[in-house]
Amino acid sequence: MTPKLGMGPLRREQIVRATIRCLARDGYAGLTMKRVAAEAAVSPGILHYYFRDKAAMLAAAALRVTADLDRRVAVQTRGARTARARLRAVIRSCLETAVESRDFWTVFIEFWGEAFHDRRLAAVNRQAYARARRLIGAGLAQGIAAGEFRQINVEEAAVVVLALLDGLSLQLAFDRGLMTLPRAARAAETALVRYLANGDPT
């Protein structure tokens, strides 16, 4: 079944958003093409036109929530004049997502579980993380060039930054009472600035 002319991108987005809602409610084990079609208010034929199986829908959902985070980061970092200010904005964006948009981590937790068993999903995950490390690394390189951060292997440092943000974000997503968002952001910034600061980090 072919969608109406010009409706393709809108219909696909509608299905992806419905997939995210279904994942948040039922998890991947409870995700079915029939449920997503009903949630998106489309026919099963339309859904199958865009996605061949639920693994493809899971991959699209992961890419969508990642794009949503990218937009949040872009807004937060707009106008940041120093590398440290940019790092602070990235931290804030990631932690806000964990607190205010739990669907992000719901989708990614389901996605990671399946990526261990599905080569297509594993490839999508590798690409998403490689892109995140490149973006973080670009900011770190600017900080090194400006003398804000010490000379450090940018690729390795990006891994460390991303690991801290992922770990703290997951804890905040699972435990809303763990700490306030401002406190979590300050803790993350303090740890990362100490790690990146000029001088001997030890």
Image: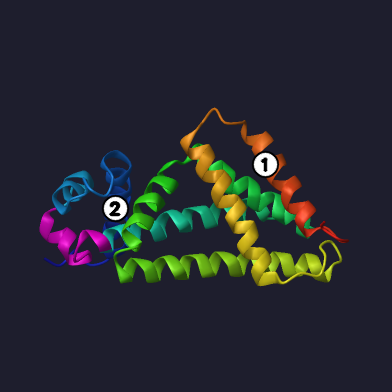
> Where residue 149 sits in the image (x, y, percent)?
81, 62
Residue 121 lies left or right of residue 177; in this view the side is left
Q: Are marks 1 and 2 in contact (CB under 8 Å)?
A: no
The chosen color scheme is rainbow
Secondary element under disc 2, as helix, strand or loop, is: helix
Cα separation, mark 1 vs mark 2, equals: 33 Å
Q: Which residue is mark 1?
A: 185
Residue type, label 2 = Gln
Residue 34 lies left or right of residue 200; in this view the side is left
- At horizontal 62% and vertical 31% (from top left) the residue drawn is 180
Residue 147 lies left or right of residue 181; in this view the side is right
Q: Which residue is mark 2?
A: 14
* Numbered tag placed on residue 57 in the rendering: none
Q: Exactly how many numbered labels are in the figure?
A: 2
Q: Determine the main secondary structure of the stretch shown in magenta.
A: helix
Q: Quadrant of the C terminus?
A: bottom right
Task: Find the magenta span and give its range.
Answer: 43-55
Residue 13 lies left or right of residue 171; in this view the side is left
The quarter of the displayed image where residue 81 is located: bottom right
Asked if the magenta segment contains residue 104, the reply would be no
Secondary element under disc 1, as helix, strand or loop, is: helix
> Where residue 35 sits in the image (x, y, percent)?
17, 46
The quarter of the displayed image where residue 115 is located: bottom left
